Image (cartoon, grey):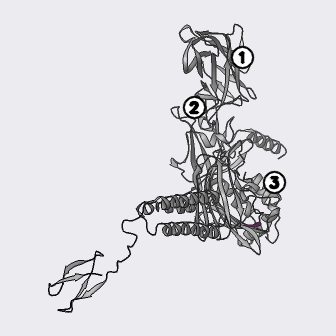
Amino acid sequence: MRVLRPLILCLLLVLSSLPLQSVSAESETVCCEYGPVDLYFTSEGSMTPFQASLPTSGEEFTITDSIAQQQEIASWRLNPAWTGDYPTEDWTFEIAYEVKNAGGAQINATVEVEIGGNVYSGATAPGNSFLASGTGTLSITVSVDAGAIPSSTDLSVTLIAQTVVFSVPAGDAGLTFYWGGSDDESLISANLPLVDLIVEDPVTEGMDVHVSLVIASPWGEAAAAHVNLLEIKVNNNMLNNDPIATKAQEYVRLTWTWEATESGEQNITIEASIQIQAGTPVLSGSSEFMISTVDDGSGGGGGFYPTEEPLRSDGGGSPLMVQVSMDLERIDGQLALKRRTILTMDEEIAYWMRWGMDNIGNEDPGMSQALRIFRSGSVGQEHMRNRVIDQVEITEFENQMVNLAVTYMNDGMALELDELIGNDINEFERIGFEINLHGEERVTPHPISMTITTLEVIAENQVLTLLSDFIIVQPIPIWANFDLVIDIDTDSMSSLTGATIKGEDGLTLTHRRGLFGESIRIDSIELEPDATFVLSALPTTSPLNAPMSLTVLTLILVIGGFWLSLKITKHKRRSALWLELMLAPIIFLALYLAYPPFQVGVTAGIAVIIWWITAVASPRRKGSKKEKAMVYPSINCPACATSNTIASDIRPMRMPCEGCSRILKIVE
C-alpha cells in the first residue's frame, strides 16, 4: 500500500495535466481573416468602412497657387488597426477634386501608407498626373507587401503633393480636394483584417437558449449597425428575432434567443456570418457548444434578460415619434398654455427604458447615471428584476420623473427637455409624466410611450419660443430619425399671432383662424437628428388680434363699407359694384389663413375704399329720376257732358269732343 499510494497520486497528477476536450465553456472566436474593403476618409482624420455613417458635408483643402515644394494635403489614421495578417496586394487611393478657373492642373503627388512601422508609397503615374478642369477623382496605386498588424498598432494614409502647376490659370485658379462627405467617394481600397466574431458560451433557461455574439472591431458599436449583412444560425436554422444589445468592453454584444426542440444535454453548432460592405466576400465561421435544456412545460422563458444595462443604441439609432398638442386660453385673468407631449420609442431605447424601470432602485455602480439616480421607493424586492414592469414600478418612475426628468432625458435619452417642452422645468405651474406600455408589460423590445403634461402662465405681447430642436446629437446616435406632429389651438379671445417655424426645410406650418379660435399644425416625418428649427409666436388677448373680436371687426368694416356703397348708388348703376364684391372673399380668406391683423385690416380697408370710389364714379340709371306729372284743365261738352282734357295753353283753340266729336271752342 505504501508503494501503491504514491503511484496513484502520480497517476492523478498526470491525468490532471492532460488536455481535456471541452466544447466551449468559454467564448470562441469563429471569424474572421482579412478581406477587401473600402475605407472612407472622415472629416475627423480617421477611416471607416461605413459610408452611411458619413455626414452630408465633409472637409476640403484648396491650393490656390502653383507649388514647387512638398506639401501635405491630409492624413487619415485608423488607431488602433485590427490585429491580424494581411496579404501582398495593390491598394488604390482615391480622392475627389475640383479644378476651378483654369484649364487643368498638373500634379505630382505621393500617397504613403504606414502599417506598424512599415511604410509603403505610391505616386501619380504619367497618365493620371493631369487633372482636367471641373470635378474628378485622383487615383494613386500603392503596392503593399504581406505582413502582420500587431496589437495596439495604427494604420495611417497620407497624401502629399510635391508640385502643382495650373494650366491656363485665371487670377483665382484653385485645386480643391474633398473628403469626409457622403457624396465625396474619397477612400482607399485595401485588404485587411477588420473584425472578429466571438460566440460566447450559450446560456439556457428552460428550453430557451440565449446565443451571444460579440462584434469586435475598431468601430465598436457602429459595426453592428452599419455592416451590410450579419447573420447567426443555430444548427443551420437562421435566428431572425431582434437581438438584445449590451456592451462588451469597447465592443457590442448581440444576444438572440433560440428555442430548443428537445430537452437534455446536446451539442449545437453556432455559425456567424458578416459582410462589411456590399460586393465584398461574406466572412463566416462556426463552433460547437454543449448545452443542457429542461422542458418544464412552461414553454419559453420570455426572452433574454441581461444582468448588465443594455445599450441605448445598436450604433444606428431608434425611431422616435413626437406628438405635441397645445391649448392657449385665458384662465383667471391670466394667459395659460397647456401642453401635452407624447414621445413614442421603439427598439433599443425602448428596451433600455423598460429594463431601467424593472431595475428602479438598483444601485449597481456599473449602471449609467440616468438610471442610478432613481430610488426604489415603494418598489419591493419581489418587483425588482422580475422581468415584468409592475404598476408600482410605473407609478414610482412617474413620480420621481418630476424631479429627475432633466438628467434622465438629457443624459439617458439624448433629449434636451427644456427645448422639448419650451421652458425650464421649474417655471411650470404643473408638470406630470405618464408611461404607456402599449399592452406589453414584459421587458422586451416593444414600443413604449412617455406623455409629459405641463401648464404654464405666459406673458402677453412678447414673442414666445414654443419649441426648438431638442435632440442632442451623439457620436453613436441614439435616434435614427424622428417624426414630428404639432397641433396648437387657442380660444376665441386669445391668439398666437405671427406663428412661424424657422430652420429645417422639411417643416411646414399651417395656421388657420376662425370665429372661435386659431389652429396651428406642423407635420413632418423622418427628420434627421441634427435637424434645427425654432417655433415661435406672439401670444396676446388684444381685441385686434383675438379671433372672435378680429372677425367681428372685419365683418363690421366689410358690411358697413358695402352698405354705404349701396346707399351712394341708390339711383346709380351697380354692375361694377357687384363685380367688385368678389373682394369680400379675399378679405375673409386672409382672415381664415391667419394673416396678421394689420394685413387683414389693410386688405379690408383697401376693398372698402375701392367700393366707395366705384360707388361715387358710377353713372346714374336711365329714368331713375321721376318726372313731375303735368296737371291739365278739362271742360265738359255742353252736348254730351263728356269731360275733355285741354292739353294746350294756346288761346283761342278749337278741339273735337272726345264723346260726340262736336267742335269745342276754348277762348280762355
Q: Residue at x 63, y 17 (%)?
A: 174
When asked about the image quadrant of residue 594, the answer is bottom right
Most foreground residue, 392 or 42: 42
In the rendering, which numbered label is found on residue 199?
none
Is 665 contained in the magenta span?
Answer: no
Q: Is residue 626 left or right of residue 385?
A: left
Q: Residue at x 73, y 30 (%)?
A: 80
Magenta segment: 453-462
The amino acid on which the numbered mark 1 sits, given as a three-letter code, is Glu
- Which residue is label 2 attached to? 183
When asked about the image quadrant of residue 394, the answer is bottom right
Q: Is residue 68 left or right of residue 381?
A: left
Most foreground residue, 291 or 435: 435
Gap between marks 3 and 1, in whole Å?
44 Å
The amino acid on which the numbered mark 3 sits, given as a three-letter code, is Gln
Q: Can see residue 286? A: yes
Q: Position of residue 423 (x, y in %)?
A: 77, 58
Is 460 contained in the magenta span?
Answer: yes
Q: Residues within 10 Å of mark 1 (few under 14, many from 20)?
A: few
- Which residue is label 1 attached to? 72
Taking 631 as reference, is 18 above or below it?
above
Most foreground residue, 533 or 599: 599
As helix, strand or loop, the secondary structure at mark 3 comes to helix
Which badge, 3 or 1, comes first in the chain's sequence?
1
Q: Position of residue 61 (x, y in %)?
A: 68, 22
The quadrant of the image that shows the C terminus is: bottom left
Which badge, 3 or 2, comes first in the chain's sequence?
2
Q: Is residue 73 left or right of residue 230?
A: right
The amino acid on which the numbered mark 2 sits, given as a three-letter code, is Asp
When asked about the image quadrant of residue 262, the answer is bottom right
Taking 463 as reference, is 474 above or below it?
above
Most foreground residue, 480 or 608: 608
